[in-house]
Amino acid sequence: MNLLYAGFSDASIARQLDIGHRTVQRRVQRLMDRLQANGRVALGARAQELGLLRSAHRRLHATGAVRRPLRPPSAPRHYT
């Protein structure tokens, strides 16, 4: 659900979860039926209303959308 809410496509979700594209489509459809949502956007809104999603910060890290830099940005180094 979090990958879907983060905006990933069915194909991308399938690759990340190592399942088939069609399996993702069926699961999304089942979720829409269960939560009585008539589209993907409505599904995300309904899931958020019901508290089914992790917080935005945790969700972005879980999907790999946010990565910490190796070191903080600094002034350019001059090597001699």
Image: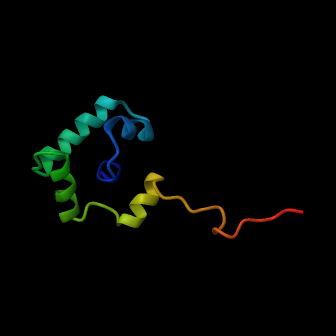
* Residue 2: % across, % down: 33, 54
* Residue 73: % across, % down: 63, 68
* Residue 68: % across, % down: 56, 62
Q: Eyeballing the image, is 62 above or below 55? A: above
- Left or right of 39 on screen, residue 57: right
- Left or right of 57 on screen, residue 36: left
Q: Quadrant of the C terminus?
A: bottom right
Query: What's the coloring here?
Result: rainbow
* Residue name at image x 14 percent, y 52 percent: 35
- Left or right of 80 on screen, residue 76: left
34 vs 69, nearest the viewer: 69
Q: How many marks?
A: 0
Q: Eyeballing the image, is 6 above or below 15? A: below
Find residue 77 and report its image quarter: bottom right
15 vs 35, nearest the viewer: 15
Find residue 18 and report its image quarter: top left
* Residue name at image x 32 percent, y 49 percent: 7
Q: Eyeballing the image, is 80 above or below 1? A: below
Find residue 14 and report its image quarter: top left
* Residue 57: % across, % down: 41, 66
35 vs 63, nearest the viewer: 63
- Left or right of 34 on screen, residue 5: right
* Residue name at image x 42 percent, y 59 percent: 60
